[in-house]
Amino acid sequence: MREWLQIEATTATTKTENQNDKMNLMNTPLQTLRAAFDKCANQTDWKAPIDFITSKAFASFPIEVYAEAISHFTATTAKITDLGDGAVRIQAAGYRKGPAW
């Protein structure tokens, strides 16, 4: 599946920004979903379960975008837990344990 990621990355870089904007999920551009997923997914195994803690104030994306990205790339639902003091934990079963595997 690693080849798929490389092919997708190569394909994405050859498309124009306008084409990327047309490829979206719930009005979030695919390139934004990819960037958000890359932030919260396991860095060595993107199919692994997701367990990501971030601060609402310093998160790279709105929390909802992380949830959309997880849903799009893993076909699983993100569980968002407010940890207090502005911290949020985002968890998901991950691609390998989801229905798409």
Image: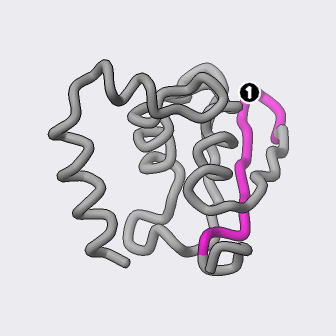
- At 70% from the left edge and 31% from the top edge, which residue is drawn? 64
Q: Is residue 69 magenta?
A: no
Q: How many neighbours does mark 1 have within 10 angstroms: few (below 14), some (14-19), or many (20 or more)?
A: few
Q: Is residue 93 magenta?
A: yes
Of residue 90 and residue 8, the one placed in the foreground of this image is 8
Q: Position of residue 23 (x, y in %)?
A: 46, 33
Q: How many marks?
A: 1
Rendered view: 33 above or below 57: below
Of residue 94 and residue 86, the one placed in the foreground of this image is 94
Rendered view: 35 above or below 46: above
- At 55% from the left edge and 56% from the top edge, which residue is drawn? 73
| Amino acid found under the numbered disc labelled 1 | Gly
Q: Position of residue 66 (x, y in %)?
A: 61, 40
- At 22% from the left edge and 49% from the top edge, which residue is drawn? 11
Of residue 98 and residue 48, the one placed in the foreground of this image is 98
The magenta region covers 83-95
Q: Position of residue 20 (x, y in %)?
A: 35, 29
Label 1 sits on residue: 86
Of residue 43 and residue 97, the one placed in the foreground of this image is 97
Scheme by which the image is coloured: one colour
- At 73% from the left edge and 47% from the top edge, which residue is drawn? 89
Residue 12 falls in image quadrant: top left
Q: Quadrant of the C terminus?
A: bottom right
- Indicate left or right for 5 with 64 as reference: left
Residue 80 falls in image quadrant: top right
Q: Position of residue 29 (x, y in %)?
A: 48, 28
- Indicate left or right for 60 with 31 as reference: right
Q: State the SS at label 1.
A: loop
Secondary structure mostly seen in magenta is: strand
Residue 68 falls in image quadrant: top right
Q: Quadrant of the N terminus?
A: bottom left
